Image (cartoon, helix red, strand yellow):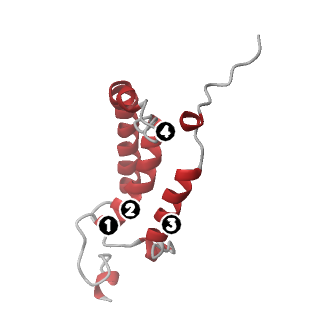
Amino acid sequence: MAGDAAGGAPGGEAGAGSSLSPLRECLLLWSLVMAGLVLAKLVLDPWLGSLVAKIPGLNGLFSPKTVAAGLFLYLPLWAMHRRNEFPEDYGAKTDGWKRSVKLYLLLSLFTPTAARAGAGAVKSPA
């Protein structure tokens, strides 16, 4: 295809994000994740974390670990979208995602958590 030979996106059109080299794109994504971690550690967790701490299922929503997991999962998808690529181009199948989300929601209803089970922090005997 003409677009592949010219280094552009498949189909002959250069995508909006195709001007970044792979190294620059990797460094951009890494810096966005690090900025998200700093934001989560300094702003989100201290201020908003206490608001959702008592709500079952939302405890830890703004913790740096949760923010890092979300960013590492979804920023590569954003980068692929900028290059007009799809997860299927890399072998990741997304055709059964609705069924997976339903199964997760069903299992999360029946999986006991410390807040729902009434168990507090485990204390060592003195």
Q: Can you say whether 32 is above or below 78 in the image?
A: above
Question: Which image quadrant is residue 36 in?
Answer: top left
The residue carrying mark 3 is: 100
For image coordinates 38% across by 62% down, the residue present is 77
Q: Which of the marked residues, 3 or 1, is nearer the chain's N terminus? A: 1
Q: Give, as a three-letter code, the residue at label 2.
A: Leu
- The part of the image, by quadrant, that contains residue 61 is top left
Near mark 1 (Cα within 10 A), the count class, few <14, some 14-19 or many ≥20, is: some
In this figure, which residue is indicated by the disc labeled 2?
77
Q: CA distance from mark 1 to mark 2?
A: 6 Å
Residue 111 bears which disc, if any?
none
Q: Which residue is mark 4?
A: 65
Estimate the x, y position of residue 122 in percent, counting from the top left: 68, 25
Q: Pointers 3 and 2 in contact (CB under 8 A)?
A: no
* Picture coordinates of residue 46, whole percent (x, y): 37, 24
**Residue that badge 1 annotates:** 81
Between label 2 and label 4, give the one nearer the viewer: 4
Q: Earlier in the sequence, mark 3 or mark 2?
A: 2
Which quadrant holds residue 47?
A: top left
Camera-side residue of 19 and 92: 92
Amino acid carrying label 3: it is: Ser
